[in-house]
Amino acid sequence: MKRYAILTLMIFGPAAWADSEDFLICARNYPDNAAERLKCYDRAAEVSHVKKDEPQPVGTPDADAAEIRPEQASTSYLTRVWNLDNRTNRDGSALDRLQPHQQNYLLIQKTSSINSQPYSPSIGRTVATPYDYDAAEAKFQISFKTDFATQDIDLLGMHTLRFWGAYTQQSYWQVFNTRNSSPFRETDYEPELIAAFGTGNQTGWKLLNLGLLHQSNGRSNPESRSWNRVYAQGGWEWGDFSLLGRGWWRIPESAQKDDNPDITHYMGYGDLMLRWQAEDNSQSVALLLRNNLSLSQNLGYLQLDWTLPVDLGRAASLHAQFSNGYGESLIDYNHRQTTLGLGISFREW
């Protein structure tokens, strides 16, 4: 039945659906991909059918329209997250300009090895007396970005240039350690500036990011840790799968100011993020890999995140996380451990 509705719309043209922005979005997002465009038409027709057949209370917003946005359901992950199709903001408010950056979640996790005495080869950065920490703690991450300038370009296969400011905060809270007043063990702050170039491709290589990133834990010695990097990151996408590959160069610091001179030996020189997301956005699997690319002393880090298809209201899903290696947090950059966490992750807003 939906197919006939779509054919009717296609035959009679704009007169049949001039009032429906959803179909215009489908045509704009998939100008060269008839199969994906037809899928998008199907979803939009289904939403339109629901809205017409189910009466809405007078004076109340359309609940189905708020719950299902065809442009979000049909647009690919990288296109959506980096706004590669130049979709306008949903409204004019300043808050609406905030977009997800990295994952946002709250977990209870347990480690196989407590880092009770953090150390660094830099003078004055080694804890003398071991801390009384628990293996189980709460971990949460807040991450968002906003774009502040956009430019259409035609340069080396790039068609759009968008400038972003981003912020990520990751905290580790010893919530069960009541004997020590449940302290925050570590909080890492990560602001960055990003120039995102869009290729305009519907599949394959989709973007190139050039970024400047600072990461620190904002603590005094001996716990102080920080570093600054510039990086280049490519983004590729095929259907429900995406790949982000990044290489970075650490900005040198003087020996007196360097909190962690050997950090690249443990944290490496780049990372890979492989991600799969179900077509209906119900679940996703993300794999983060880092490596120092050393043949003699190869060190790295692996993190696997899975958002489970169990809804917790409209804003969250169950989230499981497994990690192994060096650099779970900045204070742990040279400490190897395995962690397992379970909690909730917050969806795109």
Image (tube, helix red, strand yellow):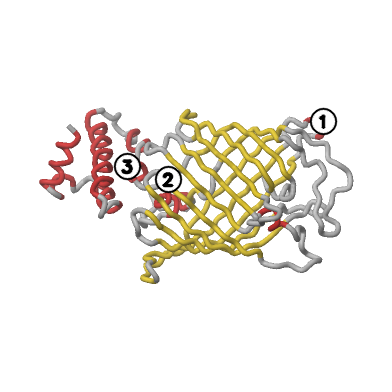
User: In terms of secondary structure, where does tag 2 sit?
Assistant: strand
**Among the two numbered marks 1 and 2 on one chain, the one whose residue lies closer to the N terminus:** 1
What residue is at 51 percent from the left and 59 percent from the top? 233
* Residue 307 x/y as whole percent: 50, 35
Q: Mark 1 to mark 3: distance in Å?
A: 51 Å
* Residue 349 x/y as whole percent: 46, 43
Q: Quick check: 137 left or right of 307?
A: right
User: In terms of secondary structure, where does tag 3 sit?
Assistant: helix
Label 1 or label 2, whichever lies nearer to me, is: 2
Q: Amino acid at mark 3?
A: Pro
Pointer 1 with pointer 2, Cβ within 8 A: no
Q: Is residue 297 above or below residue 142?
A: below
Q: Which residue is mark 1?
A: 179
Q: Which residue is mark 2?
A: 241
Q: Is residue 235 above or below residue 345?
A: below
- Which of 334 and 10 lies nearest the eye of the viewer? 334
Residue 70, label in figure: 3
Q: Quadrant of the N terminus?
A: top left
Pointer 2 with pointer 3, Cβ within 8 A: no
Q: Amino acid at mark 1?
A: Arg
Q: Mark 2 to mark 3: distance in Å?
A: 20 Å
**Among the two numbered marks 2 and 3 on one chain, the one whose residue lies closer to the N terminus:** 3
